[in-house]
Image (cartoon, rainbow, N blue to C red):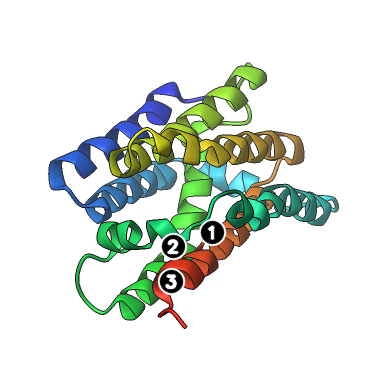
Amino acid sequence: MNWLLAAAAPLLVGAVFMACGFIHPAILAYHGLCAVVVVRQRARVRTLLKGGRSTSAWVLGTTILVVGPLLAAPLMQDPAPFRELFLRTLFPRGQVSTLFALFAAYTLVVHAPLEEIFWRAVVLDPDRGPLPASIAGNAFFFYLLHAIPMTLVLGARGLLFAVPTLAAGAIWSWVTIRSRSLWPGLLSHWAADALLLAGMWAYFVRPPL
């Protein structure tokens, strides 16, 4: 577990967000950090991109574990009251539908795979222990990465709303170690982000009927 990188990522996002007042520069700075480190550790990444006979089962099980609870999220918290805040934070100006399409494409093509590779191949480093501490640490700092900007936008509620990322980080870390592959985390992370984007469109972007 690379504790320095684990702490650097959420601190970078929080610092850039506070300095600029916009989330997008913070996202780009974070992805820049991820990209540089992933390229430097590409040999380790390649070894974890190999699949085995059980990889499909790991992908299916992980996706159900991560995506399943997201389907129930709107039942626990009505997203509608956050529509204006969402638009003001991510798309303060311009054609929202066009910007959202670009945001969604960037999220699925760049963000989801780059983030998963960074956290589970480089930060976690499955070949080094102690594994329980590595899983807990990876999940905690992955939670902070999301909790810090959410708290800056939502206040104390952001700490609570980011809790699902703590659970997802723990699941993805554990699965990566057990399966010895990045594919279960990569594909389930992509599926989770795709579902979140669909929810954003339905609740925040699509014009009211």
The answer to the question of whether label 1 and label 2 lie on touching residues, with beta carbons closer than 8 A, is: yes
Q: Which residue is mark 2?
A: 107
Amino acid type at circle 1 is Asp
Residue at the extreme bottom? 209
Q: Which mark is residue 193?
A: 1
Amino acid type at circle 2 is Thr
Q: Residue 178 sits in which quadrant?
A: top right
| Apparent side of residue 96 relative to residue 82 in the rendered image (left or right) | left
Q: Residue sitting at 46 percent across and 52 percent down?
A: 114
In the rendered image, residue 150, in percent from the top left (x then y), is placed at: 37, 42
The answer to the question of whether label 2 and label 3 lie on touching residues, with beta carbons closer than 8 A, is: yes
In the rendered image, residue 81, in percent from the top left (x then y), is placed at: 41, 57
| Apparent side of residue 3 relative to residue 136 in the rendered image (left or right) | left
* Res. 121 visible in picture: no
Q: Which residue is mark 3?
A: 105
Q: CA distance from mark 3 to mark 1?
A: 11 Å
| Apparent side of residue 52 relative to residue 198 in the rendered image (left or right) | right
Label 2, secondary structure: give it.
Answer: helix
Q: Residue sitting at 65 percent across and 21 percent down?
A: 131
Q: CA distance from mark 1 to mark 2?
A: 8 Å
